[in-house]
Image (cartoon, rainbow, N blue to C red):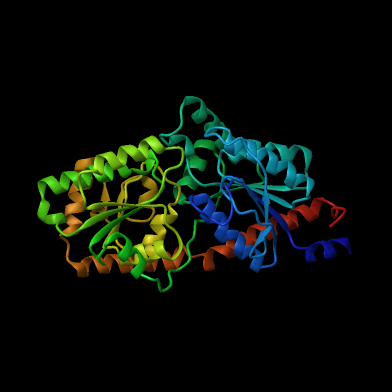
Amino acid sequence: MLFYIALSIPIRIAMIGQKGMPNIFGGVERHVDDLTRRLVQHGYDVIVYCRPWYSRRAKSSLDGVTLVSLPSIHTKHLDTITHTLFATIHAIRHRADVIHYHGVGPALLAWLPRLISPATRVLVTFHSIDRKHQKWGLLARFCLKLGERCAVYLPHQTIAVSRTIEQYIRDVYDRNAKYIPNGINLPTESDTVSPIRRWRLEPQRYILFVSRLIPHNGALDLIAAWLLLSARQPASVQNKKLVIVGGGHYTSAYVKKLKKLAADDRSIVFTGFQSGRTLQALFAEALFMVHPSQNEGLPINVLEGMGHSLPVLLSDIIEHQDLIRNPEYLFRQGDIESLATRLAQLLNKSPALLQKQGQKNAEMVRREYTWDKIIDSYIELYEQNKRETLAVEPLPAGR
């Protein structure tokens, strides 16, 4: 009888590792925001742990998702791990059925619920190989490497957001991860007037970069390639603009370096961080998108660009080749000459060919990377964990 009662109680899922909700910036935050809203719509009891500096407006819930704000030591190296500790303790005390860690950094504490709350199922989503990011020093990279081991050996289930990460886990750690990709919402009609007015942009006359301004995302290479192309082939960039969308995060010196490099070129536009309708409009009216990143998981911003039927020019890292195989839309990562050459080729390509590639991109996103399709995989995963818990554990008291 207790088994059937337990089946009727909503699964309580605690999301830990994201900075907060609603999403302001960050791929993990975007992922958690989209995922949790859908889980609530399917009847799940979801808690998202927030950091006060990120989620400045104190709310107890959002669209049915319970928000819990807990402190952290807000420094580059201690913010995530201290918040993860407080969130894990809170989730255990409030009898979460599932603790779902996002990222290999937070996974460092996945042992804690396994040790003191055996009835709690522990999941970890491996979003990217964070230790490869340029912003980290040797000690941080060591900790993130340890976090990878925790992410694959400690939880009941590890989730990989890309086929590349799935293969990495298999090759390096001899473990099988469950592949569930990042997803996006299909674009809707946007208000395109606002960004055009604000930055004097013309439809189909600007190239778009959307990302946080941190070294491994490659904005410096893109600006250098644009300046190189402007000097060598000014006709290619005539009446065109390069639009840099994004803000820094513990990288103010890097952002200053970018703006200093671009200071003498009026065709380079910095919009700062953008979201919502403004960001959707910037996607909708761009000629094509560029993402010169050195390391990725499965970039949501690239999926969004593809979902808007944009051609995307990507660095040739293996994660990007999961999305784009056409060599005309890939360049050698870190090679400014290669990037400048590809920019020139796309700027001189016929609009019909660009449109054809953009349509192919949109079709692939609709087929494989929309939340309407992906949410079913998460529901199956959580339900499987609930069944496995009930097979060995009694119904928790107080629920």
Looking at the rendered image, the quarter that the C terminus falls into is: bottom right
Q: Is residue 268 left or right of residue 350?
A: right
Image position, residue 377 (x, y; %): 58, 61
Which corner quadrant holds the N terminus? bottom right
View extreme (bottom): residue = 189
The count of marks equals 0
Residue 287 x, y percent position in the rendering:
26, 63
Q: Residue furthest front?
A: 198
Position of residue 31 relative to residue 5, above or below, is above
The answer to which of 273 and 183 lies nearer the viewer is 273
Q: Quadrant of residue 174?
A: top right
Residue at the location (67% across, 60% down)?
61
On the image, the x and y values in percent for residue 376 come to 59, 65
User: Is 269 drawn above or below residue 360 in the view shown?
Assistant: above
Look at the image and tell me whether residue 280 can be seen: yes
Horizontal arrangement in the rendering, residue 39 relative to residue 139 (left or right): right
Of 122 and 175, which appears nearest the observer?
122
Please give the name of the residue rendered at 48% of the width and 49% of the height, measured from the top-left corner: 26
Give x and y (percent) for residue 10.
75, 63
Residue 237 lies in quadrant = bottom left
| Residue at screen point 42% across, 45% down | 296
Q: Is residue 161 visible?
A: no
